[in-house]
């Protein structure tokens, strides 16, 4: 029996296998891995190539402010004109506008100021002498008949510059004011021209002088202008010495007294009274008070106080002045504007870093509520690395027109620049 025949189909040969195609996925994976590694490295390096932003400083204190509290209300007169100021701080207040008014014998402040700037006297110095002429002595009876304020003089009388100024500033001698004017400038008219030039130079824009005594009502000024002059006059040693005297002795007239009855009371150290029918009672005054261990000069003027005669007018101007001085002294105090350690500025560093700049000591000023104060912080440029509690700048505080008060500034917490990892992490 024959075995069945088996049929086989012959398949075509398989195509050769290319080894490169089998390795392609592995090569691509490797290439991608390298690219990813390189890309990540570039990504990490990129923020390190960029410079860090510079730190900034932001002030937390204002550049100006007012002393806290309610501004003082001064007891101004019912009429006339007045002003009061504190040397080195500024004007505390004013009343009655700025219309030029007759100022009577307050005029003699300018007369004495011109004489002393032309012929300076040292402390206690008598200075040159002048001789009363026959004509000047002969005018005395007529001047007395007019009711002028005078000292007796005689022809040939020899008097020193200081004695003549004492006669002008204490008993308010009109005749001695004219004698001094002629001695200085050759004539009264020439001296009056000089008075007006000086007034212009001092910024006394609402003042006009027509005589050296103030008897003429056309000699006019304002409280503001006379405060300017009084402050300058009190800087002259001889002037300040004379106006604080209660009495003096001069040739012929003998002992003369100061019409300013406030001298020696409430700290008053001068300076000049005035009184006529047209001007009323007038006074320019200076006083010294002590606040927080610091001496302060108060300078003021009160004009146009009414009254039937000179004694009444002066009594009223003295009463107004005493009230003003007491209120002013009560308003002056020491005020702490910046406490020790108080933050003055904020430092903002890169990537959220930061610190502060603080006052090393408290800052105190003398003044009154409402007085304007300027604050100036001088802070050098800040780097990204700051050590803790190190001096870095100065804070200067100025109250009104006073002397600046300064304190050092110190850093707060330390500030370090960000680490490399912080920079990379922040960039993500």
Image: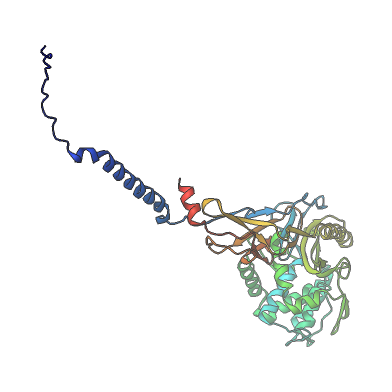
Q: Does any portion of residue 396 appear in the rendered image? A: yes
Where residue 372 sits, quadrant-wise, is: bottom right
Give the camera-side residue of 185 and 294.
294
Residue 164 in percent (x, y) is at: 78, 80
Residue found at the far front of this picture: 1
Query: In this figure, what is the number of numbered marks?
Result: 0
Give the camera-side residue of 217 and 285.
285
Answer left or right for 407 relative to 293: left
In this figure, which colouring scheme has been used for the structure? rainbow
Against 37, residue 210 (above or below) is below
Residue 322 in percent (x, y) is at: 86, 60
Answer left or right for 393 relative to 141: left
Who's the residue at 27% across and 38% down the image?
Answer: 25
Dividing the image into 4 quarters, which one contains the C terminus? top left
Give the camera-side residue of 426 and 391.
426
Dividing the image into 4 quarters, which one contains the N terminus? top left
Who's the residue at 70% across and 78% down the image?
Answer: 115
Who's the residue at 20% across and 38% down the image?
Answer: 21
Answer left or right for 344 relative to 15: right
């Amino acid at each position: 029996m024959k075995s069945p025949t088996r049929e086989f189909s012959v398949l075509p040969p398989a195509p050769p296998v290319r080894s490169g195609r089998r390795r392609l996925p592995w090569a691509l994976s490797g290439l991608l891995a390298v690219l990813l590694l390189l890309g990540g490295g570039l990504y990490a390096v990129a923020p390190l190539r960029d410079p860090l932003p510079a730190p900034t400083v932001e002030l937390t204190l204002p550049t100006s402010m007012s002393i806290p509290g309610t501004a003082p209300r001064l007891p101004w007169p019912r009429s006339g004109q007045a002003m009061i100021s504190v040397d080195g701080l500024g004007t505390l207040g004013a009343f009655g506008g700025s219309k030029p008014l007759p100022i009577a014998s307050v005029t003699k402040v300018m007369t004495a100021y011109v004489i002393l700037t032309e012929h300076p006297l040292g402390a206690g110095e008598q200075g040159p002498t002048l001789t009363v002429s026959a004509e000047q002595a002969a005018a005395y009876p007529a001047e007395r008949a007019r009711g002028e304020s005078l000292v007796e003089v005689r022809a040939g009388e020899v008097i020193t510059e200081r004695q003549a100024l004492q006669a002008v500033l204490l008993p308010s001698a009109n005749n001695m004011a004219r004698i001094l004017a002629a001695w200085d400038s050759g004539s009264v008219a020439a001296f009056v021209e000089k008075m007006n030039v000086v007034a212009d130079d001092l910024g006394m824009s609402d003042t006009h002088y027509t005589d050296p005594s103030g008897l003429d009502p056309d000699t006019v000024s304002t409280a503001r202008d006379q405060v300017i002059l009084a402050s300058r006059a009190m800087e002259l040693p001889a002037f300040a010495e004379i106006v604080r005297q209660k009495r003096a002795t001069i040739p012929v007239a003998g002992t003369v007294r100061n019409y300013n009855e406030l001298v020696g009371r409430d700290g008053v150290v001068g300076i000049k009274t005035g009184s006529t029918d047209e001007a009323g009672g007038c006074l320019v005054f200076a006083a010294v008070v002590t606040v927080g261990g610091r001496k302060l000069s108060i300078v003021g003027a009160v004009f146009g106080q009414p009254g039937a005669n000179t004694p009444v007018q002066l009594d009223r101007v003295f009463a107004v002045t005493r009230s003003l001085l007491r209120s002013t002294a009560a308003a002056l105090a020491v005020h702490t504007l910046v406490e020790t350690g108080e933050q003055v500025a904020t430092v903002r560093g890169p990537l959220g870093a930061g610190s502060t700049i603080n006052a090393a000591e408290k800052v105190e000023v003398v003044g009154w509520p409402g007085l304007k104060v300027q604050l100036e912080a001088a802070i050098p440029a800040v780097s990204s690395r700051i050590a803790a509690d190190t001096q870095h700048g100065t804070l200067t505080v100025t109250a009104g027109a006073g002397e600046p008060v300064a304190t050092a500034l110190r850093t707060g917490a330390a500030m370090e620049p960000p680490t490399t990892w912080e920079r990379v992490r922040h960039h993500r």
